[in-house]
């Protein structure tokens, strides 16, 4: 088996010693090439090249951003049966996709599980999300979530503070700061789902490919409990960002049941496709990575898009 290990050396929990242990362990089982990323988009380019070269496996060692780039590189020409399988060894602070797949958070434990899965030829095909737009921008794939509005603004501000560690505390501080900005500066969004009436006047829209949508440290955050890698997308949107509404849904998100209810809530599960429109450009994020500003995006659920080892 030919494999490419893509390592982000700047990821939160990635170390040179850990990379060497991982590379040595993999090299005992496969013919291995190691690529260390040194610029934004490098992991995407490396994964695309691996797919073109006919590799059997691409392993992403880093955080959710690294995994997202590798996925987008593998799928740069669309899904197909001959694509390399994806392996993940978590190396970031949140590791949402890896945790949702049930992979160990510890890189050494994750490496052992990956090796056993390769020996047992154990993998699964997962559904992924894809964001298209009306402009010339390329489609962007996501593994666990996409968002339009407030959460994308938070991602943009965290990226601006690039010199600081992207910890849950930093995200929380930035989220509060963004929330306190005047609401009149946020465009109202419209969601259209085929076969249903458009829903307008929305202040934010989250689209989930799995649940939990993210984590606050060790605590899972639930928006669409019926969502998973074997179903279509979950949609969670709010008509209001007033404090009582936000606090109500935050309490529900961290509760034991995670069930979301409320008069200002629009929520749907198992949605194969939706369109989100805004009267003016609004930020969009995929897997916690800002992809720019759009006035209209179409988001699709692509079934069995990629094979994941684990």
Image (spheres, helix red, strand yellow):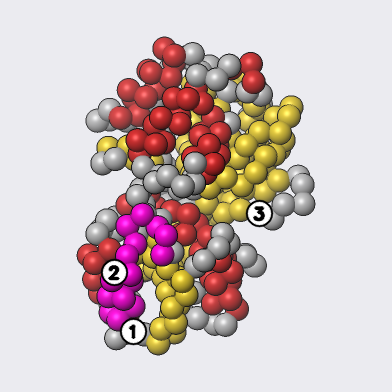
- At a point 30% along the width and 30% down the height, the residue shown is 254
Q: Which residue is mark 3?
A: 139
Side of 3 where 138 appears, left or right:
right
Q: Nearer the viewer, mark 2 or mark 3?
A: 2
* Residue 80 x %, y %: 57, 70
Disc 2, disc 1: CB below 8 Å?
no
Q: Earlier in the sequence, mark 2 or mark 1?
A: 2
Residue 256 to residue 300: above or below:
above
In the image, what residue occupies the spot 39% across and 46% down? 165
Q: Marks 1/3: CA distance? A: 34 Å
Question: Circle 3 sits in a helix, a strand or a loop, which is it?
Answer: loop
- Apparent side of residue 36 relative to residue 191 in the rendered image (left or right): left
Q: Is residue 166 magenta?
A: no
Q: Residues within 10 Å of mark 3 (few under 14, many from 20)?
A: some
Q: Quadrant of the N terminus?
A: bottom left
The residue singled out by tag 1 in the image is 27
- Cβ–Cβ below 8 Å for labels 1 and 3? no
Q: Earlier in the sequence, mark 1 or mark 3?
A: 1
Question: SS for tag 1?
Answer: helix
The residue sitting at the front extreme is 163
């Amino acid at each position: 088996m030919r494999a490419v290990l893509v390592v982000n050396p700047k990821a939160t929990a990635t170390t040179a010693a850990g990379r060497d242990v991982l590379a040595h362990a993999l090299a005992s089982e496969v013919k291995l090439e190691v690529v260390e990323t040194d610029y934004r988009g490098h992991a995407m380019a490396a994964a695309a090249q691996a797919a073109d070269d006919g590799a059997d496996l691409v392993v992403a060692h880093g955080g959710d951003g690294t995994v997202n780039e590798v996925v987008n590189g593998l799928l740069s020409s669309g899904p197909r049966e001959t694509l390399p399988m994806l392996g993940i060894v978590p190396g970031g602070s949140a590791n949402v996709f890896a945790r949702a797949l049930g992979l160990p958070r510890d890189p050494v434990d994750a490496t052992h599980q990956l090796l056993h899965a390769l020996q047992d030829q154990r993998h699964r095909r997962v559904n992924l999300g894809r964001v298209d737009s009306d402009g010339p921008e390329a489609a962007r794939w996501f593994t666990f979530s996409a968002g339009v509005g407030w959460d994308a603004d938070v991602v943009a501000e965290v990226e601006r503070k690039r010199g600081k560690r992207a910890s849950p505390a930093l995200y929380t501080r930035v989220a509060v700061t963004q929330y306190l900005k005047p609401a009149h500066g946020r465009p109202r969004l419209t969601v259209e789902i085929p076969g249903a009436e458009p829903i307008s006047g929305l202040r934010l829209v989250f689209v989930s490919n799995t649940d939990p949508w993210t984590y606050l440290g060790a605590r899972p955050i639930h928006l669409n409990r019926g969502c998973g890698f074997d179903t279509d997308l979950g949609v969670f949107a709010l008509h209001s960002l007033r404090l009582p509404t936000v606090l109500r849904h935050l309490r529900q998100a961290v509760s034991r049941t995670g069930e979301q209810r409320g008069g200002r809530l629009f929520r749907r599960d198992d949605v194969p496709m939706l369109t989100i429109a805004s009267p003016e450009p609004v930020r969009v994020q995929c897997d916690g990575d800002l992809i720019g500003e759009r006035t209209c995006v179409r988001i699709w659920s692509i079934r069995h898009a990629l094979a994941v080892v684990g």
